[in-house]
Image: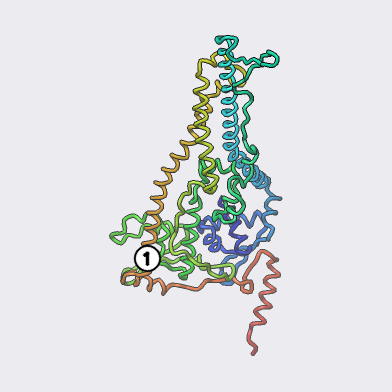
């Protein structure tokens, strides 16, 4: 959300900002940042300060979020819905793991019941067709008869701890978790890892545009508010036709940050962004990345152990489902598919279909990600090339950079001691304070 981006920028910049501050930190256009700042100041009781030079700064209370929540029912509902969605999405994530476990349990139990039913049927047929002495032995001491049971009886099957799969550390011990280089893998339980195995963990470049505009704003500020087109190129995608010197790719940057071109006598073009050079406080410049890096898609953040476990369970589930299907088609079970086996027989195609999709979806997704990552790697390589070209500029580019340095200016900090007007106090009081200040600074005769 646009307002949320502005609110985060205000908090990050210590509650005293200019339009340029917010645009540079959030990646919003200057026009959008200006409108949103004015709206936010109005809704939260913020203050507007005007310097002697006519520059504007906005000052907000540190609890402006609480003020907004108290004033706006819509924002309160939005905050509640965001919290509810987190829990709903968590339940969605673990539901696929729960369905997998329940489906495997149903299939395995059905196989056991079907095997027992088949064995009982075989025993019944054998006893009716064989002679009465086929399964007998005589006790030499008393002539009594006992029958030996060579059937299935009550098979004992060890399932281990059925609740262990609900623990986050299932499959990986504590030492392995401590050595893991993936922080998300430490926090993701097995049930969530099933969702991650199936569908991944979202677009790693969802914030790409925000990062792009932040980086461009930092580059502009680091160069005194004036840049050449080549200095912006490592942060953009397709530059279009540049073979004839066209720099159309700079136009979106000019529109977003209210820039203007400057042309030298030799025909070199640079771009000025004066509003980005006005700041609400003197802040240390952060390191500017040399190019915009797109992140590669990960197959899963669940960790190798949990991914292997999910795949292994999927394979076991598919094999077990196919085996169950062969049992259900057995003529010996004809007319006996009632109760639990009748339910499983009716739901068999759903169980088999889920098993097939459980393995097919990740396989298809894996190959799709390979194509996406190849394209992302090519984009990154192209941006790296542009950044490297800037490190060893040609004579033409060097000429443009030198021309840009002629227009570079230091940041204009709106100091609290250099205010012409502020909405924090009455106008009469401000005029009186201004008069006293002028009297103090007036040289004595």
Direction from residue 141 to residue 180 in the image, left or right: left
Instruction: Identify the residue shown where x is 53% and y is 46%.
Output: 201
Farthest residue in the front direction? 141
As drawn, 171 above or below 11 = above
Q: Nearer the viewer, residue 354 or 123?
A: 123
Instruction: Identify the residue shown where x is 55% and y is 9%.
Output: 129
Instruction: Identify the residue shown where x is 59% and y is 38%.
Output: 92
Mark 1 crowd level (few <14, some 14–19, many ≥20, 10 Å Cα): some
Q: Nearer the viewer, residue 103 or 330?
A: 330
Direction from residue 216 to residue 170 in the image, left or right: right
Place of residue 417 in the rendered image (x, y in percent of width and height, measured from the top left): 63, 74
Place of residue 263 in the rendered image (x, y in percent of width and height, measured from the top left): 36, 68
Direction from residue 140 to residue 387 in the image, left or right: left
From where the camera sits, is residue 15 visible? yes
Farthest residue in the bottom direction? 445
Q: Which quadrant, please, contains the C terminus?
A: bottom right
The colouring scheme, among rainbow, by chain, secondary structure or one colour, is rainbow
Q: Nearer the viewer, residue 323 or 382?
A: 323
């Amino acid at each position: 959300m646009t307002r949320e981006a502005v609110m985060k920028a205000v908090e990050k910049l210590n509650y005293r900002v200019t339009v340029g501050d917010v645009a540079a930190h959030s990646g919003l256009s200057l026009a959008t940042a200006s409108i949103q700042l004015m709206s936010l100041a109005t809704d939260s009781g913020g203050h507007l300060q005007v310097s002697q030079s006519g520059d504007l700064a906005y000052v907000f209370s540190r609890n402006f979020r609480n003020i907004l929540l108290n004033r706006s029912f819509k924002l309160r509902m939005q905050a509640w819905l965001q919290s509810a969605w987190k829990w709903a999405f968590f339940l969605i994530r673990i539901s696929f793991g729960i369905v997998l476990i329940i489906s495997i349990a149903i299939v395995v139990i059905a196989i056991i019941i079907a095997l027992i039913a088949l064995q009982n049927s075989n025993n019944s047929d054998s006893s009716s067709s064989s002679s009465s002495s086929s399964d007998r032995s005589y006790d030499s001491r008393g002539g009594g008869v006992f029958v030996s049971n060579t059937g299935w009886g009550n098979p004992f099957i060890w399932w281990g701890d059925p609740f262990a799969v609900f623990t986050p550390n299932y499959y990986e011990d504590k030492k392995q978790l401590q050595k893991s280089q993936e922080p998300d893998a430490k926090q993701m339980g097995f049930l969530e890892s099933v969702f991650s195995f199936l569908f991944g963990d979202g677009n790693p470049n969802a914030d790409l545009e925000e990062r792009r505009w932040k980086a461009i704003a930092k580059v502009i500020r680091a160069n005194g508010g004036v840049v050449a087109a080549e200095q912006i190129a490592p942060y953009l995608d397709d530059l279009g036709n540049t073979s004839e010197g066209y720099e159309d790719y700079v136009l979106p940057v000019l529109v977003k940050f209210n820039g203007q071109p400057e042309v030298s006598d030799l025909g070199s073009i640079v771009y000025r962004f004066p509003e980005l050079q006005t700041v609400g406080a003197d802040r240390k410049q952060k390191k500017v990345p040399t190019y915009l890096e797109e992140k590669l898609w990960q197959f899963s953040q669940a960790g190798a152990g949990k991914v292997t476990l999910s795949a292994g369970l999927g394979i076991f589930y598919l094999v077990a489902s196919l085996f169950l299907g062969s049992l259900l088609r057995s003529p010996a079970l004809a007319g006996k598919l009632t109760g639990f086996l009748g339910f499983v027989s009716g739901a068999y195609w759903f169980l088999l279909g889920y098993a097939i999709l459980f393995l097919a979806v990740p396989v298809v997704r894996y190959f799709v990600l390979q194509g996406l990552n190849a394209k992302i790697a090519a984009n990154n390589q192209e941006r790296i090339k542009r950044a490297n070209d800037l490190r060893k500029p040609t004579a033409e580019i060097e000429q443009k950079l030198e021309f840009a340095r002629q227009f570079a200016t230091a940041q204009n900090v709106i100091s609290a001691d250099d205010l012409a007007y502020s909405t924090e106090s009455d106008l009469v009081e401000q005029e009186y304070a201004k008069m006293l200040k002028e009297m103090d600074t007036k040289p004595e005769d």
